[in-house]
């Protein structure tokens, strides 16, 4: 019997400002797996993640979660953005930030209650940050910032967690703690999709990998896809024709968008 | 209600300050400070149009048309920015000039055709002395509504401003939230134009938020401080222009608020620039004093020149600091040269102890060679707390000597 995939990507082409960054991707992610999206800089990892999260509309194809559009399943997912994506001088305490994870679609106008605060404190404790709950977020180290972001995402109690380079600029102690939390989630049957750049650690921590270099190079269990051929295709530079065609598409004045994909 | 005009003006200006401060916080936090300025300018054609159509300056048409052109200008910014390579601030500049120009054209043609008496000319500079009770009611209603919305939506709005990516992934309706915020800003600015004037409104949207952010990182304090500083400057400005009718209320409010902002930036205890400079001077003096104590502890009967040289300071400065130390009872004259008093003795041995404990720690735990220890300890000796000192003693189990084989002076217990 075929297992229903948790993420289903079909013929996905997407990018910014009419410049495609990923081409015709097809792959699936199974439930309960720790999956990494791997590829060199500029290979479209972030674009793919943005498609999965519904932040950009694809030019062609689709990315479905649980067989549906992401907008219908937002209550079941959580996201840990790159910590550089926000201003850490923002007037907020650590607890304020973790509480931000307690909102669910359709109840943004409801005030948070005691239960939400307890949940936030629980996840701060799980990430080893409870003693810093009343600190200003700007006073935290890189690793602590990442742990706050993880606690905020986990406060949503997601079935599927997305992370964007969670180990970049993080000290060894925090990295170990974050990895431990992620492994616990997998043990509890949750699924994780993580953009990652370090091949060495990827082989040790991931179950499955998606190797990306504008087009899909390979996807599947790490033990199968991590071979010399795939890795040199991912990190090599034999893409000159493809990048020339991307240039053509970008400079062409015609509309490069599948009409079926217009936002409803 | 039967209140004198001055009271209405007073209430109106305070309300205006409170309301604009609260409204400006999301703009400030989203780094769209200048967008408030642009929006305020873009209201002018709408407000003029409203007055022209209705004949009154407090008619509902004025609020409707003002808000309308304000939102239209934002839509124009988005359209330009998203469909071309012109960046957002460039698009804002284009839109601001276009709408303000239209407004000025309307304004001047209306003044020529006899609309001068309905107070059109004060839209730009603001003149609260002519404030109508009906306008104060609008401000009051908006303020109550603003308080309620802030209470209800404070956390989601904070999330929206802090991390739009995460907010979007959690399912927050981003575009709707943004347009509601813009609509709110347009409404508030239209309502406050009478007292502040549109050019100065931007200052009242942003400066209070900046003051609040400078003084506190806790959201609720930040909001409170912002509102209080703007509310007070509104009240003071009303009082000021009541005594000196020539002064424009909007200008008075902005001047008072800005003066307060500069005072806070410069002189607020512990945070202001001058305060921090003063604290750093005191700290420097403490370091020098501790160095003098240490040198006197190590070698008795030092000459004044030798002491100043060892501490790396001029003779004159050394003399000044020693006088102040003598007043504190740390040192005393003994046979023509300075010596430690018993209090000074105690303090000096504490500095030396910390210095040598830290050297031992660096040597033993961080495996630094003996010639790398001293410079680091010269700094840390002034900073260690009692608590850290006893923790150091504990993990090193009270060594007799430091890595340079000097005795570590412990307290006699």
Image: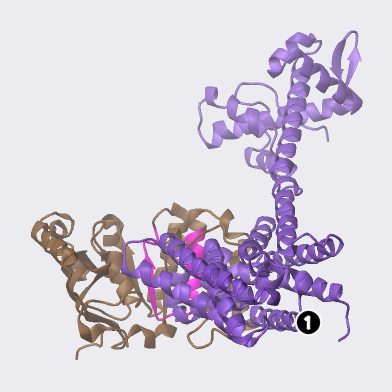
Chain colours: A brown, B purple
- Residue identified by numbered label 1: B133
Q: In terms of depth relative to the viewer, which is nearer, B211 or B352?
A: B211
Q: Position of residue B97 (x, y in %)?
A: 48, 63
Instruction: Give B164 or B51, whichever is nearer the viewer.
Output: B51
Rendered position, A172 above or below B325: below
* Left or right of residue A170: residue B105: right
Q: Does residue B238 appear anywhere in the picture?
A: yes
Residue B278 at what x, y percent from top left?
Answer: 75, 37
User: Can residue A126 be found in the magenta stretch?
Assistant: no
The kind of secondary structure element at disc 1 is helix
In the rendered structure, the answer to whether residue A22 lies left or right of residue A72 reads left
* Residue A163 forms part of the magenta stretch: yes
The residue most toward the left is A241
Tell me if A2 is positioned left or right of B152 in this view.
left
Rendered residue at 49%/63% (across/down): A147
Residue in front for this viewpoint, B39 or A211 = B39
Q: Chain of mark 1?
A: B
Q: Magenta part of the protein: which range?
A: A145-167
**Position of A167 relative to B269 (above/below):** below
* Outermost residue, front side: B113
Q: Residue furthest bottom?
A: A1
Q: Nearer the viewer, residue B410 or B373?
A: B373
Q: Where, by quadrant of the figure, is residue B82 drawn?
A: bottom left
Q: Which quadrant holds residue A168?
A: bottom left
Picture quarter with the N terminus of chain B: bottom right
Give the percent coordinates (x, y) of residue B411. Answer: 80, 33
- Disc 1 residue crowd, few under 14, some 14–19, many 20+, Cα 10 Å: some
Name which residue lies at 47% across and 85% down: A105
């Amino acid at each position: 019997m075929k297992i229903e995939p948790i993420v289903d990507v079909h013929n996905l082409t997407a990018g910014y400002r009419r410049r495609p960054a990923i081409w015709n991707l097809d792959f699936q992610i199974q439930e309960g797996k720790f999956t990494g999206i791997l590829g060199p800089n500029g290979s479209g990892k972030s674009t793919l993640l943005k498609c999965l999260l519904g932040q950009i509309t694809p030019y062609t194809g689709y990315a479905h979660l649980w067989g549906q559009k992401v907008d219908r399943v937002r209550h079941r997912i959580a996201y840990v953005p790159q910590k550089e994506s926000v201003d850490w001088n923002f007037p907020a305490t650590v607890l304020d930030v973790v509480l931000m994870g307690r909102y669910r679609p359709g109840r943004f106008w409801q005030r948070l209650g005691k239960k939400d605060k307890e949940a936030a404190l629980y996840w701060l404790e799980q990430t080893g940050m409870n003693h810093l709950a009343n600190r200003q977020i700007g006073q935290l180290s890189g690793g602590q910032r990442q742990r706050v972001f993880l606690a905020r995402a986990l406060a949503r109690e997601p079935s599927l967690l997305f992370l964007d380079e969670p180990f970049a600029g993080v000290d060894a102690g925090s990295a170990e703690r974050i990895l431990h939390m992620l492994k616990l989630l997998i043990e509890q049957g949750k699924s994780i999709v993580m953009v990652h750049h370090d091949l060495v650690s990827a082989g040790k921590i991931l179950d499955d990998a998606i190797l990306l270099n504008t087009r899909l190079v390979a996807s599947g269990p790490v033990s199968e896809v991590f071979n010399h051929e795939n890795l040199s295709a991912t990190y090599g530079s034999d893409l000159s024709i493809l990048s020339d065609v991307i240039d053509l598409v970008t400079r062409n004045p015609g509309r490069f968008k599948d009409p079926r994909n217009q936002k409803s | 209600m039967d209140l004198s005009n001055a009271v209405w003006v007073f209430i109106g200006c305070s309300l205006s300050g409170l309301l604009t401060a609260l409204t400006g916080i999301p703009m400030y936090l989203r780094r769209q400070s200048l967008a408030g300025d642009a929006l305020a300018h873009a209201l002018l054609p709408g407000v003029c149009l409203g007055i022209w159509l209705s004949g009154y300056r407090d008619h509902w048409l004025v609020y409707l048309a003002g808000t309308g052109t304000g939102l239209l200008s934002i839509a124009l910014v988005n359209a330009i920015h998203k469909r071309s390579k012109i960046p957002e601030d460039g698009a804002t500049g284009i839109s601001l000039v276009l709408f303000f120009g239209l407004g000025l054209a309307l304004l001047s043609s209306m003044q020529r055709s006899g609309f001068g008496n309905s107070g059109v000319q004060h839209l730009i500079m603001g003149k609260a002395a002519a404030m109508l009770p009906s306008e104060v009611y609008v401000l009051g209603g908006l303020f109550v509504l603003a308080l309620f919305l802030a209470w209800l939506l404070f956390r989601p709005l904070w999330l929206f401003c802090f991390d739009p990516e995460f907010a979007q992934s959690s399912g927050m309706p981003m575009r709707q939230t943004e347009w509601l915020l813009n609509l709110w800003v347009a409404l508030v600015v239209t309502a406050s134009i009478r007292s502040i004037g549109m050019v100065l409104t931007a200052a009242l949207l942003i400066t209070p938020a900046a003051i609040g952010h400078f003084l506190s990182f806790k959201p609720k304090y930040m909001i409170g401080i912002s509102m209080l500083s703007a509310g007070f400057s509104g009240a003071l400005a009303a009082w000021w222009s009541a005594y000196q009718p020539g002064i424009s209320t909007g200008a008075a409010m902005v001047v008072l608020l800005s003066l307060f902002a500069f005072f806070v930036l410069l002189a607020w205890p512990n945070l202001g620039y001058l305060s921090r400079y003063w604290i750093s001077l005191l700290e420097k003096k403490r370091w020098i004093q501790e160095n003098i104590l240490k040198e006197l502890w190590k070698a008795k009967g030092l000459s004044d020149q030798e002491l100043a040289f060892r501490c790396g300071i001029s003779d004159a400065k050394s003399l000044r600091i020693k006088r102040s130390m003598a007043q504190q009872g740390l040192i005393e004259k003994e046979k023509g040269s300075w010596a430690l008093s018993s209090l000074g003795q105690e303090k000096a041995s504490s500095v030396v102890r910390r210095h040598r404990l830290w050297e031992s720690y660096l040597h033993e735990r961080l495996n630094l060679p003996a010639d790398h220890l001293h410079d680091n300890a010269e700094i840390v000796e002034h900073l260690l707390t009692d608590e850290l000192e006893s923790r150091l003693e504990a993990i090193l189990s009270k060594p007799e000597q430091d890595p340079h084989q000097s005795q570590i002076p412990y307290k006699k217990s």
